[in-house]
Image (cartoon, rainbow, N blue to C red):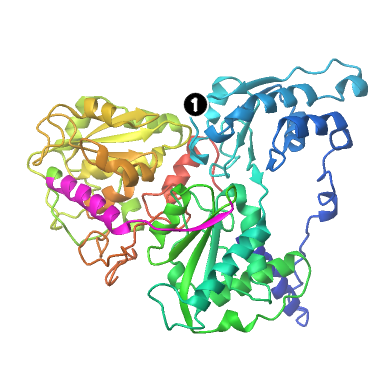
Amino acid sequence: MEDGDAANSVMASSSTSCRSSPAKPARRIVRRNKASSSGPGGGLPPHIVNNQQLQHAIRSTLPADYEFEIPKTIDRIEKSGAVKVALQLPEGLLMYATCIGDILKKFAYASSDSDSGRPKPCVDISVLGDVTYGACCIDDLTAQALACDLLVHYGHSCLVPTTLTAVPCLYVFVEIRVDVRHLVDCVRLTFLKEATEGREGDAGQDGKLVELAVMGTVQFRSAVLEAAALLNQRDHAIPSHCATSQALSPGEVLGCTAPAGLANLNWSDAVLSARDRRAQKNAQPAHAPSQNHVSPQTTERVMIFVADGRFHLEAAMISNPSLRALRYDPYSKTLTEERYEIGNMKRLRREAVQRVREMLGVTYCRNFRHGKDIANGLGSCANNFRNSEDIANNLLQTSQNQQSHTHTTPTSSPIAPSSPCALPSNPQTMGIILGTLGRQGNPGILARIRSLLRSRGIRVIIVLLSEIFPKKLQMLSGEKGGGPSGAASGVCAWVQIACPRLSIDWGHYFCVPVLSPFELFVALGEVPDSNLWSDNNKEDGTNASNEQSNGFEGDYPMDFYSKNGGPWTNYYESNNDRRALSCGIQKV
């Protein structure tokens, strides 16, 4: 969204500068008339907006502070002519599924009897009962199997574009109204008290400048934007910015994707850019910045996170380990300081990576292939897929063909013959788990990892799992799996293409190492270690030096759905292309 606003800003400025030059006509920009959607009905038809029985049903059955967008959903059902509708809700909202279903069933096509004289279409509602952890779990494939005409997914952002879903999909964020004034007052009073009394260990730093990165989950995105705007107001202003990761809304954070590099961000430019965008959007002149926004004496940057839990906040803390984090709980109306043992997390993941290196006999090499070289070096396995059937046929081939590949080094191996990384003399078996819970698993990443392992002479077994449990992996790994010198039989280690947080948070509870795609790239030397896995880390988990990073800065990346991520992420070049092609949609 911000990119679009920035593009409009560039086009507007260029058209203004071209007025004096007759060589090229000014580009005409047509904007949508906001008057049609700014009213009480938001552009919805009158028979929905003025339906008092519908409004009464919503008020009497659903919580007032939760925006389920019932009128918008009914309008979408009627416009698309859907008669079979699937509802998918996360565990915390599942209690409202039957109420929502009853309302949609009763009021959809409510005007059909009087308008056309034809009988009202009967809407069949299906509630998808599988667990839903996030937007990656959108279950459009199950909705398609149920022959549904529309899937309504509640509580998450649009990670999987609606143009790529198997059935038409409507995302409802379920925004929750909170007391933003109380949030802003809590933040201001906290830093005012600290400035007056002095934080523990910061005595004598009077008048220090604080800059805030305001973030939260998608349910509180309106509150995040409003809070940042109020904190930037002239009276007692605290420079605040809604930190953004590409592909997500401003200020939005996922459990696996969070903005990084906030410690090095040019705060004044970010604040002024956001202010200019808001001014342009509202057709108002941007005000000059207050003196606080350009002060070079910044001593502390703090993350303000709006959420009722820690899971999403932890992703932001992992991406920005040097920043202090405060969490505002909108239900209890409390502002608490949160901490994360980033050093201990890195130690556990470093040990898992090292175990995999020892089991696979991988020698550490510095001939890194980070970036496009990996994509170009994976051969036909990575580049010749045209649809999902091709991917399945290529991946699920016979064990005889698989073994022939393990004994013959492919000519398209990303490691040159002169590379110091030698192939193991005793090939081990490594398992690849493709998550089947909704859209968690990415066949493009699977093909890339499978080709990479085969090029190293490592046998591969592919397992499809909706949920990954230690007991199940213990059975799949074999009796001798996970030994200190590698597995003599069975699977010695796993890489899971489902949720990176599974490896980060619970990886050390499994009988054998369970790596994320990023950790596998590190284990095989495809991503430089830098200081990420070395002992040259400070106690807070930050790196003392990031020299020779070769494009990777060293902090653990939370970029699984970022458009700036590496070859282990969903939106990375060919990974994204194959996902689009697998749905029969050519990327333009």
Left or right: 282 as drawn, with respect to 256: right
Left or right: 319 as drawn, with respect to 235: left
Identify residue for label 1.
130
Image quadrant of residue 47? top right
Query: Where residue 493 appears, x then y in whole percent?
Result: 21, 38
**Secondary structure mostly taken by the magenta-highlighted segment of the chain:** helix
Is 577 one of the magenta-colored residues?
no
Front residue of 313/436: it is: 313
Q: What stretch is highlighted in magenta?
A: 333-358
Please name the residue shown 17% across and 36% down the image. Answer: 492
Front residue of 390/561: it is: 561
Residue type at tag 1: Asp
Rendered view: 353 above or below 454: below
- State which quarter of the image contains the N terminus: bottom right
Residue 414 shows in this picture: no
Front residue of 187/580: it is: 187
Front residue of 236/133: it is: 236
Image quadrant of residue 86? top right
Query: Where residue 264 appears, x then y in whole percent?
Result: 44, 73
Please name the residue shown 78% across and 18% down the image. Answer: 121
Image quadrant of residue 516? top left
Please give the count of numbered marks on the rendered protein. 1
Please name the residue shown 34% across and 62% down the image. Answer: 555
Rendered view: 187 above or below 87: below
Q: What element carries label 1?
A: loop
Rendered view: 364 above or below 512: below
Residue sitting farthest toward the top: 119
> Within 10 Å of the Cα at label 1, are there few (<14), some (14-19), or many (20+) other Cα atoms?
some
